Structures are given as structure tokens and as C-alpha cells.
Amino acid sequence: MRYTFLVTLLLSALSTFGQHPKIRNDSAQEKMDLAPATVYTYVEQMPEPAYDITKYLNENIVYPEAAALGGVQGRVIVKFIVNEDGSVSDCKIEKGIGSGCDEEAIRVLRSMPKWKPGIRNGQAVRVSTMLPVNFALKKPRQVYNYVEQPPSSGFDLPGYLSKNLRYPESAKMKNIQGRVIVKFVINEDGSVSDCVVVRGIGGGCDEEALRVVNKMPLWKPGMQQGKPVKVYFTLPIQFKLTD
């Protein structure tokens, strides 16, 4: 009886001892499975966008108002990881310009569609890369005072004014008459913008002149070196009481 007990105890101890290597092996395997994949800097085939990255940035970057108001321009360099599946992660600013541009660059890059992943030894791997994001304010196009071919109305301008101009009642009651001079820009497509009264006569006539000018049909744009350009144009509008 005592002998049987000792044999049973010994077998139990040996069985328990034999399980330890298995426990250690499982733990080591788990650590290997949980360990993050190596991030490479250079590989045989570097990752690249699977789409037009310039178009994507142009369509998605929103110029921060603070940067626009402060005239802030420049290049933000963002460092990030392209994962094995082409997704982007770990975006960080390598070089920034501030005024909200750094945050906007991060926002847009985090939302990028998947890239073509980097390839090493025939397998997709994680690769660290950098991308410059340019922030440049658009320069307003020049508005000319004089051009080789001045703009002209592509419609009956006197007839348009006669048909659409309404004499304000307040001007009639006060017997206000005269000429309102309106200055405006004729754009490359012939549309009218930036209307201002250069000389007014009051009584609601100034506002009426602006209303009619703003609703004018398209003009024939001014031409400079064979190309349509923005041109300033001044137009007198007559308000005259009839008997």
C-alpha cells in the first residue's frame, strides 16, 4: 500500500515536471506572435501610392484659416509607416510650419487610401517613409486696366439697361436725376464681379445701378496676348425723369 502510494506520487511529480517546458514554449510563442513586425527603412521594393497622390492632396487639403490669414506657406514633412496591407499608421511631423498646417497634413495622410506595401524577400513588410505636403496660397490673378482687346458686351447693352432699370420711387419723389458710375471686373469667362459705385447720386439709384449691373448677361472678355483676362470696366448709368 505504501509502495503504491509512493509510485503514484512519483508519477504525478514527473508528469507535472514534464508539462513545464510546454508552458514555457507556449509563452515564448505567444510573445513572438504579439511582438510587432519589424519596421524597415529601406527594402527591395519601396511602398508607393496606388493612386494619384498629388490629386488626392489637392482635393482633400483644406488650407487652415489661421495660416491663410497669416500668409503662412511652406512644406510640412510627415513621417509614417506603410503596413503590410498598405494601410498607413504612426503619422508624425518630421518638419512643420505651424498655424494649423501640421495638423491638417496629419489629418489628410491618416485618411489616405491604401498604398502598395513595401516588399522584402518577396513578402510585404512594414516600411517607414516620409511625404512632403506643400501649403501654398494661390496668387490672385491680375486685373488689367488696359488690354490689347478690350471687353465688349455680347448683347444689346442700351436695350438691356432700358428694359431692366427701375427708377427708385424715392428718387422720383425728390426729383433726383443724374449719372451713376459703376466700376466692375469682367472676368475671363465674361461674367461680372466686384461691382462698386465710383460716383453716385443717392435716392436708391446707386443700389439700383449695382443690381442691374450684377445681373448683366455675359460679356466678351478682354484679351491679352491671345488669352482672356480679367479687366476693369467703368459704366455710366443714366437716371432721367421723363415727362
Image (cartoon, grey):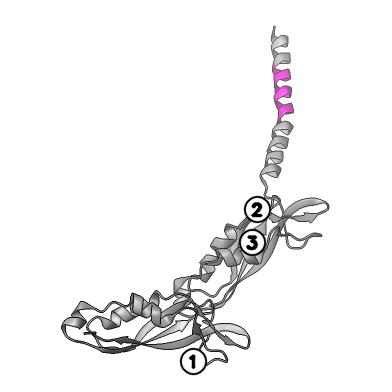
Instruction: State the SS at label 2.
Output: loop
Dominant secondary structure (helix, strand or loop) of the stretch shown in magenta: helix
Q: Residues within 10 Å of mark 2 (few under 14, many from 20)?
A: some
Question: For this rendering, which residue is in front, 4 or 41?
Answer: 41
117 on left or right of 61: right
Mark 1 vs 3, N-terminal side: 3
Residue 176 in the magenta stretch? The answer is no
Which residue was labeled with disc 1?
A: 145
139 w.r.t. 3: above or below:
below
Position of the C terminus, as image quadrant, is bottom left
Distance from Cα at disc 3 to Cα at disc 2: 10 Å
Name of the residue lying farthest toward the top = 1
Q: Which mark is residue 87?
A: 2
Instruction: State the SS at label 1.
Output: loop
**Mark 3–mark 2 CB contact (< 8 Å):** no
Q: How crowded is mark 1: few (under 14 residues within 10 Å), some or many (20 or more)?
A: few
Which residue was labeled with disc 3?
A: 80
Q: What stretch is highlighted in magenta?
A: 9-20
Residue type of the residue flagged with mark 3: Phe
74 on left or right of 26: left
Distance from Cα at disc 2 to Cα at disc 1: 52 Å
Mark whose residue sits in front, 1 or 3: 1
Mark 2 vs 1, N-terminal side: 2
**Mark 1–mark 3 CB contact (< 8 Å):** no
Residue 11 in the magenta stretch? The answer is yes
Q: Where is residue 2? Give x, y as percent.
A: 69, 9
Q: Where is residue 113? Give x, y as percent.
A: 63, 55
Q: Where is residue 223? Give x, y as percent.
A: 57, 86
Question: For this rendering, which residue is in front, 226 or 64?
Answer: 226
